Image (cartoon, rainbow, N blue to C red):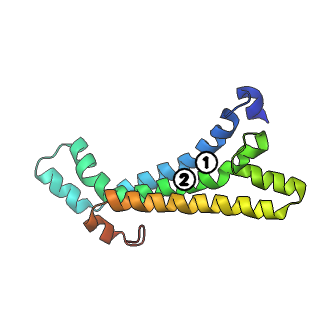
Amino acid sequence: MLITITTGFGMMPVMIPLVVLAVPPILVTTYEAVRSVDPSPVDAARGIGMAEPRILLQVELPVALPLILGGLRSAAIQIVSTATIAAYVGLGGLGRFIVDGLYQHDYEKVVGGATLVAGMALATLGIFWAVARATVSPGVRRAHQGVFRT
């Protein structure tokens, strides 16, 4: 209610909580992914004279990419699942089926809306699987079998 009063009506009252929901998993997993990179390739890069920004971009980030994508995937799925709250402030979306179905005691509509939201979450998983498959090096992908199954 306070967000609606301070920012007005429209998308802002919904976008602020969704962004706040997404930021922690992205920041935490990115930090931990870069921190957990094996120091051997980093030392080897320093040994051949690579500058620190180049080491970050060409050694640490490619190795940390599967975990970074895992954090992005987690945040995206949380946003897709939670975006149904937009229906409570009258912005529609798939949450409208759930809210209207609950109000009208039409549980088929509720189940249909929930199924659509679950389908969107699964589609988001599929998109991130494809992005990981296209961007993560096969050698790094084998080292992170638990993060993205190939």
Give the x, y percent position of residue 79. 60, 51
Q: Which residue is mark 2?
A: 75
Residue type pointed to by label 1:
Leu
Q: Secondary structure at mark 2?
A: helix
C-alpha span from label 1 to label 2:
7 Å
Indicate the position of residue 101 as horizontal and vertical percent values. Answer: 83, 56
Q: Amino acid at mark 2?
A: Ala
Vertical arrangement, residue 7 with respect to residue 50, above or below: above
| Label 1 packing within 10 angstroms: few (<14), some (14-19), many (20+) | some
Query: Which residue lies most toward the right here?
Result: 104
Q: Nearer the viewer, residue 58 or 84?
A: 84
- Tell me which residue sits at (60%, 55%) in the image: 78
Which x, y percent locates residue 118?
63, 62
Quick check: 145 above or below 107? below
Is 89 drawn above or below residue 67 in the view shown?
above
User: Which residue occupies 27% across, 61% down?
Assistant: 137
First in sequence, mark 1 or 2: give its number: 1
Q: Are marks 1 and 2 in contact (CB under 8 Å)?
A: yes
Residue in view at x 32 percent, y 67 percent: 141
Q: Is residue 110 left or right of residue 18?
A: right
Query: In the drawing, what numbered circle is on residue 21?
Result: 1
Residue 148, x across and y down, in percent: 41, 67
| 79 or 112, nearer to the observer | 112
SS at circle 1: helix
Examine the rendering and report whether any part of residue 3 can be seen.
yes
Query: Depth check: 7 or 10 in front?
Result: 10
Which of the pair 17/138 is nearer the observer? 138
Quadrant containing the C terminus is bottom left
Rendered-image quadrant of the N terminus: top right
Residue 107: which disc? Answer: none
